[in-house]
Amino acid sequence: MTKDNPKADPFDPAALRVSANIEAKSGVRKIMAHLPVHKPNRQAFFRVHPDPGYRTTIASLELKDERETYAVVPEIAYAIENETRIVDLCLCVTQQGTNFLWGVPVANSTARECAWHRTARIAASHAETSWVRMSANMSAGCYDIKLAPDGMPEPEWPTESFRDLLQIAFGNGKLIDSFDHPVIKRLMGN
């Protein structure tokens, strides 16, 4: 019962129903405090932000054991080029609304093209306009790319600038901008 309608059923599903986007209606705004850097999960459909302003080519260094990815400034990257790889860093989002950055390997003009890198770039290109799922096909030595059925909603992108997103992802010591950085010292045996 309610004050306005004493005979209303308080357990009526319509009386209890709220919008799935209740935060937006209440004026609540989510602050992005963490932005992971990784490949898309093989079980998740994802999109790549189509705006070129939400991507950049960087040198990245991945510590496999820690599963941590670092951005490396060019001056340092040249000095440790065997430890870094050049990637197109793209803003992505999963169907569940989880944002992440993905370092898509760039084409290497000096060596034979790797099928893993080529198919990752193809997946990224399709993900600009469609929901994509990408999974490793070990026997073929490449990624399988699957497109979601038509009709899935468009992604909701963060409102932060790409510069701010880079700071969120690589702040707290994940930007290697000095030879005194702990990761560089570790790689050099210091």
Image (cartoon, grey):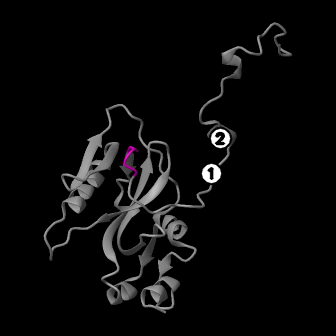
Which residue position holds label 1? 30
Q: Predominant secondary structure in magenta?
A: loop
Q: Write the start and end of the magenta stretch as one range.
A: 41-45
The amino acid on which the numbered mark 2 sits, given as a three-letter code, is Glu
Q: Position of residue 31 (x, y in %)?
A: 62, 56
Position of residue 31 in the picture relative to residue 140 (left or right):
right
Residue 74 location, x and y as percent?
A: 36, 84
Measured from the top left, where is residue 68 in percent x and y? 47, 69
Residue neighbourhood size for the residue with mark 2, other residues' Cα within 10 Å, grouped as few (<14), some (14–19), many (≥20): few
In this view, 17 is above or below 148: above
Tag 1 or tag 2, which sits nearer the N-term?
Answer: 2
Distance in Å between CA atoms under marks 2 and 1: 9 Å
Q: Is residue 42 magenta?
A: yes
Please give the residue where the numbered disc 2 appears in the rendered image: 23
Is residue 137 located in the magenta-colored stretch of the structure?
no
Residue 21 spot, x, y in % from top left: 60, 36
